[in-house]
Image: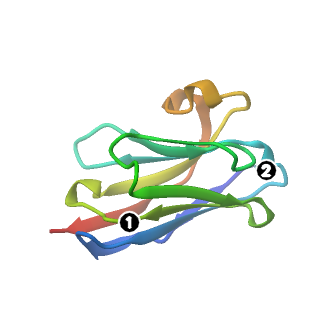
Amino acid sequence: QVQLVESGGGLVQAGGSLRLSCAASGRTFNIYNIGWFRQAPGKEREFVTAINWNGGSTYSADSVKGRFTISRDNAKNTVYLQMNSLKPEDTAVYYCARARLSSWATIWTPGVYDYWGQGTQVTVSS
């Protein structure tokens, strides 16, 4: 059974930074693409960013480009989300998820992900 555990969320002022981590179980972590999504109260879950299996490619939503950076350390089975210049509208529960194999072409689509973490709350105050 695959488990994904997010950490690093918290309360930060606008303009501040946070780094989220997504630790995964399983010996085949390094063959899977990983994505981050977020969900604000009363809104649908939305794609944030994703990284391919070897870290060679990333894809991000326009709303976070230039501010958020995704990376991974396959030796540690961990994916990171560095969030800079945070805005109040970034407030949400952030989820990491593992995508099915050969999913890069539609990596922004929730339906290509088969395992999800429990989420970590990020709150940005104005």
Secondary structure state at the residue bearing disc 2: helix
| Image point (74%, 61%), residue name | 77
> Residue 93: where, in percent of width, then height?
37, 56
Q: Is residue 90 left or right of residue 17?
A: left
Which residue does the numbered mark 1 point to in the structure image? 84
- Residue 19 located left or right of residue 12: right
Against 47, is 70 above or below?
Answer: below
Q: Position of residue 125 (x, y in %)?
A: 19, 69
Q: Which residue is mark 2?
A: 30
Q: Label 2 is placed on what type of residue?
A: Asn
- Which quadrant holds residue 104? top right
Which one is nearer the viewer's eye here, 16 or 9? 16
Residue 24, placed above or below residue 18 = above
Looking at this view, name the residue that lies furthest to the front.
Answer: 66
Q: Name the image quarter holding residue 12.
A: bottom left
Q: How is the image coloured?
A: rainbow
Q: Is residue 44 above or below residue 81?
A: above
Q: Viewed as shown, does residue 101 lie left or right of 87?
A: right
Compared across the picture, whether 13 is left or right of 103 comes to left
Query: Which one is closest to the eye, mark 2 or mark 1?
Result: 1
The amino acid pointed to by label 1 is Asn
Q: Quadrant of the C terminus?
A: bottom left
**Among numbered discs 2 and 1, the one appearing first in the sequence:** 2
Per the model, the C-alpha gap separating discs 2 and 1 is: 26 Å
